[in-house]
Amino acid sequence: MRLSEYLEVGKKMKTARTNAGISQRDMAIKLALSNSSYSNYENGYSEPPAEIIVKFCDVLNITMENLLELKVAAPKTATVRTFADLLSILIDLDRRGLSIKGNTTYSQQDNQLMAHLSLDIKNAQIATFIPDWNKVNEELASGLMDEDEYQVWLEDTLKLFNVPIDDYI
């Protein structure tokens, strides 16, 4: 049994669509799908991709949680939007035992405050990430590497380092 069958995704999509007063044909158009593709989703003949379900919810102005009648976890991302976010990460790492040292310098001429951080990382593989990252960024900036190659390198690197920090502190 497919997950969408177990969750009755097609049935729930049909109910939400009809409750909104939208025809199957109009919904297919709004989702940029053929009538038959959309019909197959509603009738459970095929499983809608997550992107279609998200777009469906956007069209009806409902959440996936409401549509599927369950709690949907947000994708995990480490978004740093403020300096407070960055400082929180550094404080967490320091509390776990990753030695973080730093100093600041101020240039009156440029009216610029520079912060220099030093992380004491005892794992050689992880410690080499920053120099490697700098090299890859230089290659990208100089045109020796294109954006697709950079994304592949980044994905591979993130998979490699997807290990608990506590294992290395």
Image: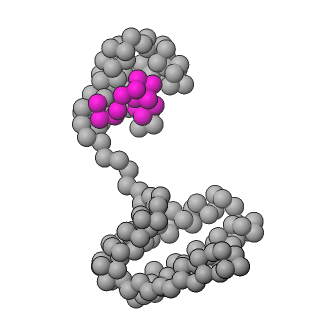
Q: In the image, is residue 22 above or below residue 98?
A: above
Q: Is residue 106 left or right of residue 4?
A: right
Please report the residue visible at 54 percent of the width from the left and 65 percent of the height from the top.
Answer: 154
Q: Position of residue 130 (x, y in %)?
A: 54, 78
Check if residue 64 falls in the magenta segment: yes
Q: Position of residue 14 (x, y in %)?
A: 34, 18
Residue 165 image-quadrant placement? bottom left
- Report whether residue 149 is seen: yes
Q: In the image, is residue 34 above or below residue 53?
A: above
Where does the magenta region start and end? 52-66
Check if residue 61 falls in the magenta segment: yes
Name the residue nearer the viewer: 58 or 143: 58
Q: Position of residue 84 (x, y in %)?
A: 42, 65
Please report the residue visible at 43 percent of the width from the left and 11 percent of the height from the top.
Answer: 23
Residue 97 image-quadrant placement? bottom left
- Report whether residue 33 is seen: no
Please report the residue visible at 41 percent of the width from the left and 84 percent of the height from the top.
Answer: 100
Q: Is residue 138 left or right of residue 98?
A: right
Name the residue nearer the viewer: 144 or 55: 55
Q: Position of residue 47 (x, y in %)?
A: 38, 32
Name the residue nearer the viewer: 95 or 53: 95
Please report the residue visible at 64 percent of the width from the left and 57 percent of the height from the top.
Answer: 148
Q: Main secondary structure of the magenta part?
A: helix
Q: In the image, is residue 72 above or below residue 91?
A: above
Residue extending farthest to the front is 108
Quadrant where the C terminus sits is bottom left
Quadrant where the N terminus sits is top left
Name the residue nearer the viewer: 157 or 74: 74
